[in-house]
Image: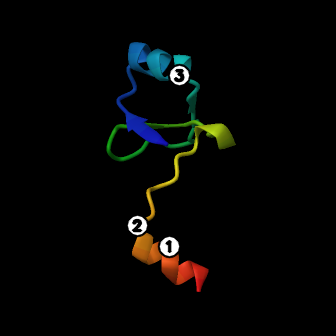
Amino acid sequence: MLECKPIAALISLYERFGFGLIEEEEPASNGLVQMIRILQEHELVSPPVDDKLKQLFEE
């Protein structure tokens, strides 16, 4: 999810990267619009797990 100014060129840029505009009945008080993109499973990145934390879960 991201927020940006309601500028057509900016919205178009994010739409080219797969984001969709969330239409709201009332504009946000900060003057920004929200856009969202659902990630596919292959796009998710797992954070590195240090060895000590890994050991806790293996016990």
Residue picked out by circle 3 = 17
Q: Identify which residue is drawn at 35% across, 47% down.
A: 29
Residue identifier under label 1: 54
Q: Position of residue 46 (x, y in %)?
A: 52, 53
Inter-mark Cα distance, 1 to 2:
6 Å
Locate residue 5: give its quadrant.
top left
Q: Is residue 30 left or right of residue 19?
A: left
Q: Position of residue 18 (x, y in %)?
A: 58, 25
Marks 3 and 2, Cα distance to the nearest angstrom?
A: 33 Å
Q: Nearer the viewer, residue 26 or 30?
A: 30
Q: Secondary structure at mark 3?
A: loop
Q: Nearer the viewer, mark 3 or mark 1?
A: 1
> Which three-letter amino acid code belongs to the residue tagged 3?
Phe
Amino acid type of disc 1? Lys
User: Judging from the image, what secondary structure is the residue with disc 2 in?
Assistant: loop
Residue 56, placed above or below residue 44? below
- Label 1: how many residues lie within 10 Å, few (<14), some (14-19) or many (20+)? few
Q: Earlier in the sequence, mark 3 or mark 2?
A: 3
Outermost residue on the left side: it is 30
Residue 48's x, y, as percent? 44, 57
Q: Residue at x 38, y 20 (%)?
A: 7
**Is residue 40 in view?**
no
Give percent across and percent down for residue 15: 54, 21
Residue at point 37% right, 33% down? 4
Marks 1 and 2 in Cβ contact (< 8 Å): yes
Q: Could you tell me which quadrant the C terminus lies in?
A: bottom right
Along the viewing direction, whichever of 51 and 30 lies nearer the viewer: 51
N-term mark: 3 or 1: 3
Which residue carries the number 2 mark?
50
In the displayed orientation, state which residue is furthest to the top: 9
